[in-house]
Image (cartoon, coloured by chain):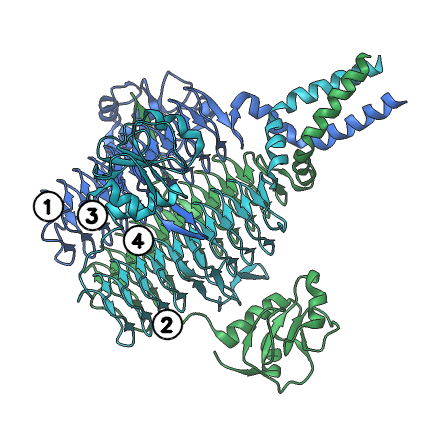
Chain colours: A cyan, B blue, C green
Amino acid sequence: MQTKTLQEIADHVGGTLIGDGSIIIESASTLDSAGDGQITFLSNPKYTPQVKTTNAAAVLVAEQVETNACQIIAEDPYYAFMQTVVLLHGHRQHPNTGVSPKASIADSAKIGDNCNIAQFATISDNAVIGDNCQIYPGVFVGPNARLGSDCVHYPNAVIYDGCQLGDRVIVQSNASVGQDGFGFATHKGAHHKIPQIGIVVLEDDTEIGAGAAIERGTLEDTIIGKGSKIGDSVVIGHGAKIGAHCLLVPQVGIAGTAQLGQYCVLGGQAAVVGHIKVGNMVKVGGQAAVINDVPDGMTIVGSPAIDANKAKRAYALIETLPDMRKKIKQLEKKLKQ
Amino acid sequence: MQTKTLQEIADHVGGTLIGDGSIIIESASTLDSAGDGQITFLSNPKYTPQVKTTNAAAVLVAEQVETNACQIIAEDPYYAFMQTVVLLHGHRQHPNTGVSPKASIADSAKIGDNCNIAQFATISDNAVIGDNCQIYPGVFVGPNARLGSDCVHYPNAVIYDGCQLGDRVIVQSNASVGQDGFGFATHKGAHHKIPQIGIVVLEDDTEIGAGAAIERGTLEDTIIGKGSKIGDSVVIGHGAKIGAHCLLVPQVGIAGTAQLGQYCVLGGQAAVVGHIKVGNMVKVGGQAAVINDVPDGMTIVGSPAIDANKAKRAYALIETLPDMRKKIKQLEKKLKQ
Amino acid sequence: MQTKTLQEIADHVGGTLIGDGSIIIESASTLDSAGDGQITFLSNPKYTPQVKTTNAAAVLVAEQVETNACQIIAEDPYYAFMQTVVLLHGHRQHPNTGVSPKASIADSAKIGDNCNIAQFATISDNAVIGDNCQIYPGVFVGPNARLGSDCVHYPNAVIYDGCQLGDRVIVQSNASVGQDGFGFATHKGAHHKIPQIGIVVLEDDTEIGAGAAIERGTLEDTIIGKGSKIGDSVVIGHGAKIGAHCLLVPQVGIAGTAQLGQYCVLGGQAAVVGHIKVGNMVKVGGQAAVINDVPDGMTIVGSPAIDANKAKRAYALIETLPDMRKKIKQLEKKLKQ
């Protein structure tokens, strides 16, 4: 954490300052909580009234608003806020310990420059770790797995054999990448494991949430596209392909071999069944069940998921079913008379 | 496990004994399975008929019932049963190993008196561990994190940097506390991580289930209130506030910045969206989706969640939709004639 | 990976070859992707047209089809494909390291012949490990727990005290077996932990997915029947009994004391409430909520779950609710006139 003047922040985010540029800003906070020495932001117009009454020293806005706080006008105030938080608070600093003698590193593994590999981490035979990687305690990197540079793997994350990770891939604690897909051949009453010979590919700039589980492919690889972010406890089935820049909120489930395009956003606990194709820029509501192909750009909600506009009205009417039933009975009765 | 006479048990729970106080009780069991030397309980009147036929030596009841077993009448028989199970079986005994030389404990960490810290556990820089804590193998306590006294952390539980835990906090295996919230600023087609500068606060007597994941706050802390119990694989989003004494059954999802009051009970797989406020003593059905503020004391079910009485009738009628549709068509036809 | 001739594969699976038995097969692939030197399969008639156009060298089929590829006719082509994948690719080879000096093995533990126990694994007091077991780094086997022979426990899997595992049990990474059930007695405003004195029994040939969590029983054991496969992030509540040969797809939740018969299949995110009995060979759709006893052989879907045939029509009609409501209003209006 380091303080900055308001002018320094305005310059950093490329914004226009309205107010006293010499004011010292110490930290970032919310509209509600921010006080002296703090900066906040307005990106959702719904909260405009709160800007009037905020006690923040300054607020990042898209256009000038009525407020006693100083303002920095920025094209994309939420992005400017992110830049400001990074400037004031920085990203997490990792312990700079080098490669611990208490880590277990196979002789055949290749470790890049400037890595920190903590005690109780395992780097297996023929694994490759790129430069500047942060490997926390209890992490397991399996045989022949490969990490790019600048990856961060938090405690007890597990990367199974052969999986391929790009640069700047973050894996949060207790996540599993590359465990066997749920694939069995049932024969004469027993379920026989099909060797899962695909791997998991996590492309550049992906992030895998805590406790998430990404299955390796049965025959073809499971792929998480560049820049996609996978929330906590999400499960991705074997051979699923997630396009670039998707956001999968916690507890989402994607069945094996499903395909998602780019820039899809899935709400919490949403599910996509196997063998279907979801287009680009599709938005899926929380708890929705996607059971058919979805064209580009659609917003769908509900279980089963349908067009959001239809669904909002339709699902809200479930509540009126007893009333509807009563009316139908009354109509039938009247008509009989 | 140690045996007690029935009289000793009656005295221990403050109950009134009907029957032979000298009978030796060895263990606790269910109404169905209990036999000689075993004690059971009746708290749900639904099971009263089974008390008649139980083979248990004794049964804990709220009021005298018809049975061949001895009876201990206690005001709250389920609580008395809990006391009895503790008396006969005790809570789990932890290995009394002290601080293992194979644990990794930072020089700057402070360890309280009488702690057991197992091999392969990591206590990071400036972390503080209170007295009488049980830290199992593979546990990670991050820099500047703080545990109160009498905490139990099961294998591979992970506490990220800076998180604050009260006294008697239990974290089950593979749970994650304080990983980054799912917070990104999307700008020119890429999702940029917003440093998550809040922490997680687990107040006194909280418990976090196996594989659960509690995100740290973006700007404000994520708080689990005193005495609340969080089930397995539950995910709590960044900055959510869970009031005191809530019960969140396994696989519940709480989105970021949602607020729950005290004594809420959420059924399995229920979800609460972000930015809403759920009152005190609210009961939420399994798989329900809470998408609006909820006043104190309500019971809600369904996705979307509505008043439980309404919902039970309404959701049950979904099954009759084909029939309703048919009737409407018939009515239209008749009316045309 | 080792190559085989087509004749060798046909002989291995007991199938009838149509085509050149001397062709060398190097690997297995999908109908879409397979090319020279690759074998694929057809088990779902839906994909018959793709067999015509496949570039695979050979295809496993149930009966002769029109295709340029060689064919092996096998009674159960999916099972034959599994056998072929095992023949060509084999199951995962585990590092043959013996018992690592960096593992922590209690003096009182018993380790079978020919086990590999990796660094940073813990085998606790009086635990028993059968022959030929593979224990990866970070695995915890608690006091008095018992594993049969030929078990595989992937990194950071946790087996709590006293749990009993059969032969050939696979536990994927970060899974928890035997953590405390979610059982509390609420008294005077506080939730008191009931000691969970049951254990978890994983019978022979069971598999537990990554991040899954199987609670120990309160009074009676939690049982996963012989040959059942439990997906990633599934939660099984305390005292539940899962029959033999069930398939529980990822993110399923089974509440405490629920009972499932044999050969049940539950889709992703499906839930079963407590204290109910699901029969044998029951199929449950994804996201379904099973809230009542289910007779043998039923297929049910929906939340709440009902007979699948009814449900498919009924849930699909939710979309038409606004239209139904409008029609009812029109009918009422007309009838008033």
Provide the residue designation for mark 3: B135
Provide the residue designation for mark 1: B110
Q: Measuring from the top left, give residue C294's x and y in whole percent.
A: 59, 38
Which of the 4 image quadrants contains residue A204? bottom left
Vertical placement of residue B71 versus C201, above or below = above
Q: Residue at x 53, y 67 (%)?
A: A219
Real-space CA distance between mark 2 and mark 4, rounded to the nearest whole angstrom: 32 Å
Provide the residue designation for mark 4: C145
Residues packed near mark 1 inside 10 Å, few (<14), some (14 to 19) or many (20 plus): some
Q: Measuring from the top left, give residue C319's x and y in whole percent.
A: 66, 35
- Disc 1 is attached to a residue of which chain? B
Residues packed near mark 4 inside 10 Å, few (<14), some (14 to 19) or many (20 plus): many
Decide: marks 4, 1 in contact (CB < 8 A)? no
Q: Measuring from the top left, give residue B244's x and y in whole percent.
A: 30, 27
Residue at the farthest bottom position: C22
Which of the 4 image quadrants contains residue B217? top left
The label nearer to you, 3 versus 1, is 1
